[in-house]
């Protein structure tokens, strides 16, 4: 039996919105028309999503986040509290750019985490399992597993599938997780590939 979605009575979900099994929407949030949200998502307090946004399964959106049209969140993305997506690069109150084609697309790939109070300038792609530090302003694409923080956000290292910052293992292109033991190789094209799920026994 599938668990139905839960919507707190203080929140509004517009007609035609699709909510997956086990997804929970907490207080004072609004989900606008055309939005599709997958299974087991947790949508916090004072969150606005849409219109026409696609969100995968297992996504966590903390309090005070707006996910505008043009943003896509893949499975297991984490949006920290009060982080900000933008959707118009050069906004003007007197020259509204509110057609769907005015929105620059932002994609956050599977498993990526966006720290508290960070800002994602529209038009970027954040790679899978990337980790964005608290308060970062992201202005450029982030590679898969990239660790980016500061303002402007700079690439400072690599993050494990599990979220822990990776350490070098002997050579500058070999990384390991001090927590879960996964190990990775950095290829010449700056792609980080998983070598082993667990550290080999000594
Ligand atoms: C970025 C982060 C993962 C730490 O990464 P790290 O590689 O372990 O960094 P360290 O703690 O070793 O700090 C290294 C340097 O970066 C600085 N730094 C760390 N996080 C930073 C951030 N978010 N923005 C700017 N500078 C940061 C530190 O002050 C330190 O500077 P110093 O070398 O001048 O002393 C962590 O600080 C962070 O921001 N996590 C996100 C937390 C969050 O938003 N959670 C949301 C749920 S509540
Ligand atoms: Zn790990």
Image: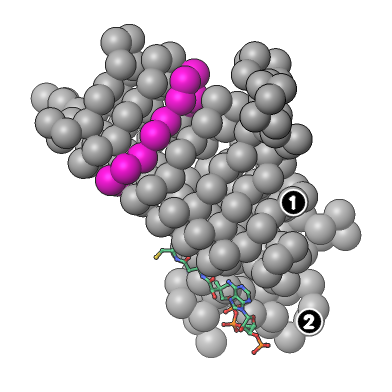
Q: Residue 121 location in percent, x, y?
A: 68, 45
- How would you classify the magenta stretch by its main secondary structure? loop
For the record, the magenta segment spans: 44-54
Task: Give the residue number, with chain letter if any, for mark 1.
Answer: 139
The image quarter containing residue 8 is: top left
Residue nearest the observer in this picture, 2 or 13: 13
Q: Is residue 193 at least partly visible in the picture?
A: no
> Within 8 Å: ligand 2 and the Cβ of disc 2?
no
Classify residue 4 as left or right of residue 72: left
Q: Residue at x 64, y 80 (%)?
A: 167
Q: Is residue 180 above or below residue 137?
A: below
Q: Furthest-right residue in view?
A: 188
Label 2 sits on a secondary structure element that is strand
Give the alpha-carbon distance from disc 2 to disc 1, as whole Å. Answer: 30 Å
What is the x, y in percent for residue 82? Answer: 44, 54
Q: Nearer the viewer, residue 188 or 111?
A: 111
Q: Which residue is mark 2?
A: 171
């Amino acid at each position: 039996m599938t668990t139905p979605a839960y919507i707190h009575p203080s929140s509004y979900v517009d007609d035609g919105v699709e909510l997956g099994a086990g997804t929970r929407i907490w207080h004072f949030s609004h989900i606008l028309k055309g939005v599709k949200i997958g299974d087991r998502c947790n949508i916090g307090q004072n969150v606005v999503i849409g219109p026409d946004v696609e969100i995968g399964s297992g996504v966590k959106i903390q309090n005070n986040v707006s996910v505008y049209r043009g943003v896509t969140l893949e499975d297991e993305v984490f949006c920290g509290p009060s982080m900000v997506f933008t959707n118009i690069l050069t906004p003007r109150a007197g020259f509204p750019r509110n057609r769907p084609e005015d929105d620059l697309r932002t994609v956050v790939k599977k498993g990526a985490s966006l720290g508290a109070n960070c800002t994602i300038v529209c038009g970027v792609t954040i790679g899978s399992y990337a980790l964005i530090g608290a308060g970062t302003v992201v202005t450029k694409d982030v590679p898969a597993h990239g660790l980016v923080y500061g303002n402007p956000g700079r690439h400072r290292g690599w993050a494990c599938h599990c979220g822990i910052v990776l350490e070098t293992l002997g050579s500058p292109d070999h990384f390991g997780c001090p927590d879960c033991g996964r190990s990775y190789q950095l290829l010449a094209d700056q792609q980080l590939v998983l070598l082993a799920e667990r550290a080999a026994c000594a």
